[in-house]
Amino acid sequence: MAKLGRYSANRIKVESITESKQLEVHDCGTLLLLDAAAGCTVTLPSVAEAGKGWWVRFVISTNVSSNTLVITEKTSEDTDVLVGGINELEVDTSDDGPSTTGATTITIANAADTVGDFVEFVCDGSKFYFHGQTKLDGCMTIA
């Protein structure tokens, strides 16, 4: 294994997203920093393109000040392939975190996002399974 000083050469890819983007197969293994203060839409590859083991993680790195952030399936090829749930750390209400057995989008609200909130996806070739965590109630909605 190659060494870079004291650090291993085996690092994950990190990319900043500042505008709408269509993810591709080569984005697998990437930590995607959501840096779009004005919001944007990120489209996952189709489950057929992604295949088994395709993985990404989205992290809020800039608060959204207008519009929303949307993560969506490739609707021209997939229908309701997002399966999973979001943990909400806020405990002062009786609401549970949102979850689904089949959805198209995850929307991150501009007034409820917190730097560090995240959602992670892994594909099994037929579905994208996701889990995430947000600090505030109602930050992420699933539809």
Image (spheres, helix red, strand yellow):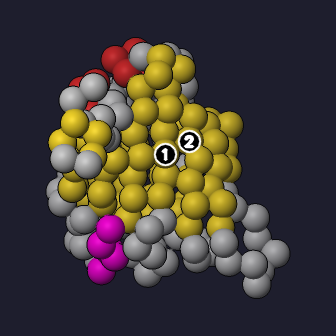
Q: Is residue 74 left or right of residue 81?
A: left
Residue type, numbered disc 2: Phe
Mark 1 element type: strand
Q: Position of residue 95 (x, y in %)?
A: 76, 70
Does residue 139 appear in this view? yes
Tell me the quarter of the picture where residue 62 sits.
bottom left
Q: Is residue 84 left or right of residue 47?
A: right
Q: Is residue 31 left or right of residue 80?
A: left
> Tags 2 and 1 in contact by the CB under 8 Å rule?
yes
Q: Which residue is mark 2?
A: 130
Main SS, magenta region, reads loop
How many numbered callouts?
2
Q: Which residue is mark 1?
A: 120
Does residue 67 appear in this view? no
Q: Is residue 105 left or right of residue 138?
A: left
Mark 2 or mark 1: whose residue is earlier in sequence? 1
Taking the spot 58% from the left edge, 76% from the top edge, the residue there is: 136
Q: Position of residue 103 (x, y in %)?
A: 56, 40
Is 1 magenta? The answer is no
Q: Position of residue 126 (x, y in %)?
A: 53, 18
Residue type, numbered disc 1: Glu
Taking the spot 63% from the left edge, 42% from the top edge, the residue there is: 84
Mark 2 element type: strand
